[in-house]
Image (spheres, helix red, strand yellow):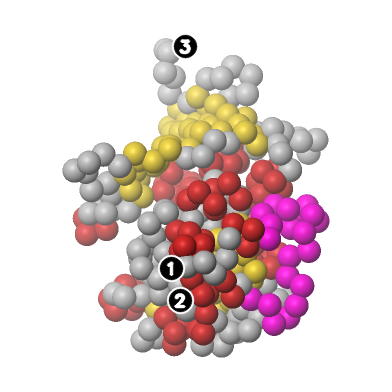
Amino acid sequence: MLVIDGPAVRELYPMSTAVEVMAEAMRRYSGGKVTLPLRTILRPEGETGLMGTMPGYVSGDDSGDDWAGFGLKAMMLKPENPARGLDLHIGVVIVFDRETARPLAMMDASAVTAVRTAAVTAVATGALARPDAGDLAILGSGVQARSHLESIRLVRPLRRVRVWSPNPDHVKAYVEWAYEELGVTVEATDGPAAALAGADLVCTTTSTRDPIVRAADLAPGAHVNAVGSSFIDHRELFPDAVAAASLFVDSRESATRESGDLRGAVEAELVDHGHILAEIGEVLLGAHPGRTRDDEITLYKSLGLGVQDIMSGFAIAAAAKAAGRGLEFSLDGH
């Protein structure tokens, strides 16, 4: 079994590769080629953190890729970690050999999640945003805010980038990182509405429980990627913002059961679950046209699926083997 650390994951799995793999992951999921139960979340009483497990199986196709088989992500969320200088999300992705079922590779799930989440957002943006979109607003300034700036610029040329986050020090660090690492000039703003004004590309990557985006904040024709609120009790969008948008999801099942943003709009009686127009995979497969008007506000609600981690895990394992990377050892001594 190969053990692959976070820096190696980022080296072996560049964003451009991840976008290609994640587009195929969404096609296979919506095309019925994935066996994937809903994730299990454990929140023991008295514990500040939680554990999520996401097992699954991905069928192959005729392309001869190495992205199919059984896999599992086990992830811990520990709120105290950022103050310790550690990632909020800690865990592992494990993929298994298709022939022998022996563990093929285990890798840092934080690094995988950072890349694959932003890569799926890029896929959704490429499918739903206006071709001329290029004014990007990012809410949040953490790991996902950084990964999303990397990924969005692969699918749309950016004219302007603005960021807002409740922590001014984090915003300052983000602006400096964007210029030094990516050569992108990012403007800091005083609030969500200021960041969103006139933006035709939006990524919300915060950990807030309470909504911060109103319908009035969204420009006509904007495409919104709602990424941060991945639990039923977390919301980034006010109900009117969800109701004002054409809603696309990674998974209908996950969105109807796990999306706090959608739940808020349903509870406000502004929409029902039929507000979901399609999964991103259905748009990629041609089963739904996606955006139909220039002034249409499109919303991609991201919750994250095990298929994204499993296919990423197989792609990373194959790249590590080819490059001679990772620490190799045997569990059974053979």
Residues shaded magenta: 277-297
Amino acid type at circle 1 is Glu
The percent coordinates of residue 74 (x first, y second) are 41, 37
- Residue 106 appears at what percent x and percent y? 46, 33
* Depth check, front residue: 214 or 274: 274
Mark 2 lies on residue: 213
Question: Where is mark 3, residue-wise?
Answer: 334
Please name the amino acid that badge 3 sits on: His
Residue sitting at x 22%, y 59%: 83
Residue 244 located left or right of residue 177: right
Residue under pointer 1: 236
Q: Which mark is residue 142?
A: none
* Residue at the image position 58 percent from the left and 29 percent from the top: 70
Does the segment drawn in magenta span residue 107? no
The Cα–Cα distance between marks 1 and 2, rounded to whole angstroms, is: 6 Å
x, y percentage for residue 3?
A: 43, 33
* Residues at discs 1 and 2 in contact (Cβ within 8 Å): yes
Which tag, 1 or 2, sits closer to the chain's start? 2
Give the number of marks. Answer: 3
